[in-house]
């Protein structure tokens, strides 16, 4: 594994965050399968090293925008289990008072400008946040997460053009998990994805998205440079989603094989790889790691029970936070 500039405490925090994401998703999947969660959700399991590797290079003042597959980004940027599960279950104690659900979680206190169910929908938001930072002479950086399928959206090229012209402090993070919904990426995306950014004069990198230290090391360097006005940048992160496109996509063998899934899980799992590294380097023992895993599992179970018992928003709030006073907003 690549080695990031970090210390033992950072390594353990990154491992904890990856396990927190996997544990959250396991519980979210069970809530859906037991008919306790409304609507659909899109699992992030398998891609944990991307969200954690990137977000560990950011501060609370740095921003991110997320996607329909956004639980991992939310947790990695500082979200807690209770408010996350409350949001998924439509409860008033959720991050958006239960009105956003799985695909629209935002946590402004940690710089998370929100997940977005529209493919590529947050690209303009991220670029706008970076423009704000430049105009206000702030040194915060914005990371825009999106999937390989979103590279077919024209908005990406409009905002990359603007970001390149104005040298905006934004990093476009393309999570290439090999599939756009139910179709292999190579069947719908001609040529190189990084070359698309390079066409605008944007420095682009491809990195192993299953190696949290490689992701973190690269992101640290690019964030530091973006703070100095050298942005924008583009990263293509090669990763894999273990579940289907969404929780209801259970018959995946018609577009990918079980052998392929097994290979990624057995040989390229980001958590297994990082755990082995921590043990081999003497950073943590198997016993310490097992204790941490058990603690996280208990925290998640308690948060689920809390969310199940929490209240739904009152019906009188149906249009609260839906509309705004335009005059006040523009004042």
Image (cartoon, rainbow, N blue to C red):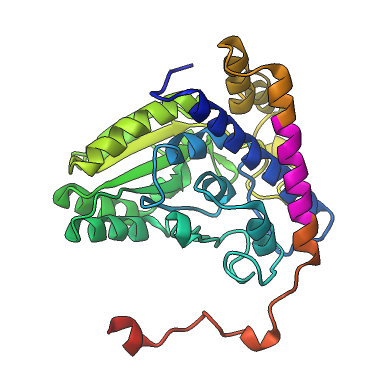
**Residue 154 left/right relative to 99:** left
Q: Position of residue 266 (x, y in %)?
A: 68, 20
Q: Residue furthest left?
A: 165
164 versus 184 height, above or below: below
Would residue 166 be found to the left or right of residue 144 on screen?
A: left
User: Is residue 135 among what the camera can see?
Assistant: yes
Q: What main secondary structure does the magenta stretch of the protein show?
A: helix
Q: Is residue 46 left or right of residue 35?
A: left
Q: On the rendered image, what quadrant is the C terminus found in?
A: bottom left
Q: Is residue 195 visible?
A: no
Residue 58 x %, y %: 39, 42
In the displayed image of the protein, which residue is found farthest to the right? 34
* Part of the protein shown in magenta: 292-304
Q: Is residue 197 above or below residue 319?
A: above
Q: Nearer the viewer, residue 35 or 296?
A: 296
Q: Quadrant of residue 18?
A: top right
Among the 4 quarters of the image, the one containing residue 268: top right
Instruction: Please give the name of the residue rendered at 78% of the width and 51% of the height, measured from the top-left corner.
Output: 302
Q: Is residue 301 magenta?
A: yes
* Count of numbered marks: 0
């Amino acid at each position: 594994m690549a080695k990031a500039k970090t210390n033992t405490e950072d390594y353990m925090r990154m491992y904890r965050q990856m396990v927190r994401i996997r544990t959250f998703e396991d519980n979210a999947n069970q809530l859906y399968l037991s008919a306790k969660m409304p609507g659909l959700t899109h699992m992030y399991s398998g891609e944990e090293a991307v969200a954690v590797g990137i977000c560990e290079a950011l501060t609370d003042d740095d921003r991110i925008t997320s996607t329909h597959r956004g639980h991992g980004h939310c947790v990695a940027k500082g979200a807690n289990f209770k408010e996350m599960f409350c949001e998924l279950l439509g409860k008033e104690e959720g991050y958006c008072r239960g009105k956003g659900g799985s695909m629209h979680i935002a946590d402004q206190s940690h710089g998370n400008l929100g997940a977005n169910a529209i493919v590529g929908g947050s690209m303009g938001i991220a670029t706008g946040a970076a423009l704000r930072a430049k105009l206000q002479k702030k040194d915060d950086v914005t990371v825009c997460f999106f999937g390989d399928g979103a590279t077919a959206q024209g908005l990406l090229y409009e905002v990359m053009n603007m970001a390149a012209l104005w040298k905006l402090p934004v990093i476009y993070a393309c999570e290439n998990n090999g599939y756009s919904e139910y179709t292999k990426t190579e069947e719908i995306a001609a040529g190189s994805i990084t070359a698309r950014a390079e066409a605008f004069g944007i420095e682009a990198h491809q990195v192993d998205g299953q190696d949290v230290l490689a992701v973190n090391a690269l992101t640290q360097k690019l964030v530091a440079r973006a703070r100095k006005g050298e942005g924008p940048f583009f990263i293509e992160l090669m990763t894999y989603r273990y579940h289907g496109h969404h929780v209801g996509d259970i018959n995946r063998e018609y577009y990918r094989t079980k052998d392929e899934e097994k290979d990624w899980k057995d040989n390229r799992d980001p958590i297994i790889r990082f755990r082995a590294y921590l043990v081999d380097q003497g950073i943590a023992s198997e016993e310490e790691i097992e204790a941490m895993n058990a603690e996280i599992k208990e925290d998640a179970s308690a948060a689920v029970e809390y969310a199940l018992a929490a209240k739904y928003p009152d019906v009188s709030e149906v249009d609260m936070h839906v509309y705004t006073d335009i005059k006040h907003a523009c004042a």
